[in-house]
Amino acid sequence: MLHRFGLLATCAVAALAFSAPTFAQTKWDLPSAYPTTNLHTENLTQFAADVDKATAGKLKITVHANASLFKAPEIKRAVQGGQAQAGEILMVNFENDNPLFGLDGVPFLATGYADAMKLYKAQKPALDKLLATQNLKLLYAVAWPPQGIFANKQINSGADMKGLKWRAYSPATAKIAELVGAQPVTVQQAELAQAMATGVIDSYMSSGSTGYDSKTYEHIKNFYDTQAWLPKNAVIVNAAAFNALDKPTQDALIKAAADAETRGWKSSEEKTAWYLQQLAGKGMNIVKPAPQLMTDMKKVGDVMLADWLKKAGPDGQAVVDAYRK
Ligand code: PCA
């Protein structure tokens, strides 16, 4: 009898222990398209850990790196549709959705970190508004390091780019190919190493970060450091999923996102030189572009900005004006 009572008491204590934290735990999936050691992914992982800590485990965000859950171009729609509650997107990938997403992909509009931040601030009110119409909310955005040209061929002018087998990651990088007479093939970073290995492409524009992550030095000799633009990754959340959180959890999420944004921009800028050193250490030539190449690429940028303004209309013009003020 006594024994049986003891067992019952133990069960009751055990049941209590299991139900003691009576809060509902929310679990979110957050797909991203870049490897775990990438600067954006490391920042995201820290962000998820910060949210966990600040909410005492109430909101658990699982980061699915390397396009393992959704491929880069699918992430935005997955978050809109609620297949994932949050996600990291490369905004310029969605320029055909709305031109506003493509503004930070226009060559030579904003070329350093200070200008890229200024452009982001000019873009942000319009972005917030646009995302709200798509059942999305922006948590934070971080710039990639400045974009240069990877090529085996010696490139001293725009004319030298003719005929390159050019990897594009966005509508704008495909447009550059079109303007210089290269052959664009759209390949996201997760498939970039394979595209180089199989000879599908022999050149592309991106950051030292992606050159390093994709081991471009195993296939391509030169990096022309044009510093042409700094595209941004944005971490977005499904608005309904966000609204379903209680207020303290929402506040904790927003605070962690603000911290991630500050931390991310800092680490992106700090690592820029480090990435180029790594590429040089692996035998790549890091080249200061010839004046003719810069002149020709700036002309490409002018054409693309004019195109962009035509597509984006008065709302777009207002954003560019706010940036240039
Ligand atoms: N890396 C990404 C986008 C911009 C960048 O620097 C890529 O090449 O896919």
Image (spheres, rainbow, N blue to C red):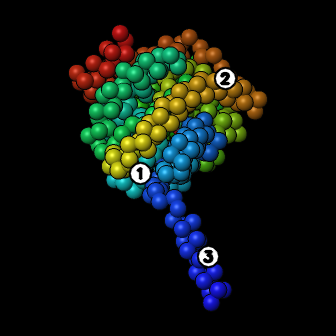
Can residue 116 be seen in this snapshot?
yes
Q: Which residue is mark 3?
A: 10
The first of marks 2 and 1 along the sequence is: 1
Q: Residue at x 43, y 28 (%)?
A: 105
Q: Amino acid at mark 2?
A: Ala
Q: Is residue 88 left or right of residue 310?
A: right
Q: Residue at x 36, y 25 (%)?
A: 123
| Mark 3 in CB contact with mark 1 (< 8 angstroms) | no
Q: Is residue 315 above or below residue 251?
A: above
Label 2: few (<14), some (14–19) or many (≥20) C-alpha neighbours in 10 Å: some
Which disc is residue 85 wearing?
Answer: 1
Report whether 221 appears left or right of 244: right
Q: For numbered disc 3, what is the local secondary structure? A: helix
Relative image position of residue 274 (x, y in whole percent): 69, 26
Task: Mark 3: give few (<14), some (14-19) or many (20+) Cα within 10 Å.
Answer: few
| Residue type (three-letter) at the residue carrying disc 1 | Gln
In terms of sequence position, does the residue under pointer 3 or pointer 1 come before the other?
3
Across and down, in percent, residue 301 comes to 42, 20
Q: Residue furthest front?
A: 2
Q: Position of residue 180 (x, y in %)?
A: 46, 26
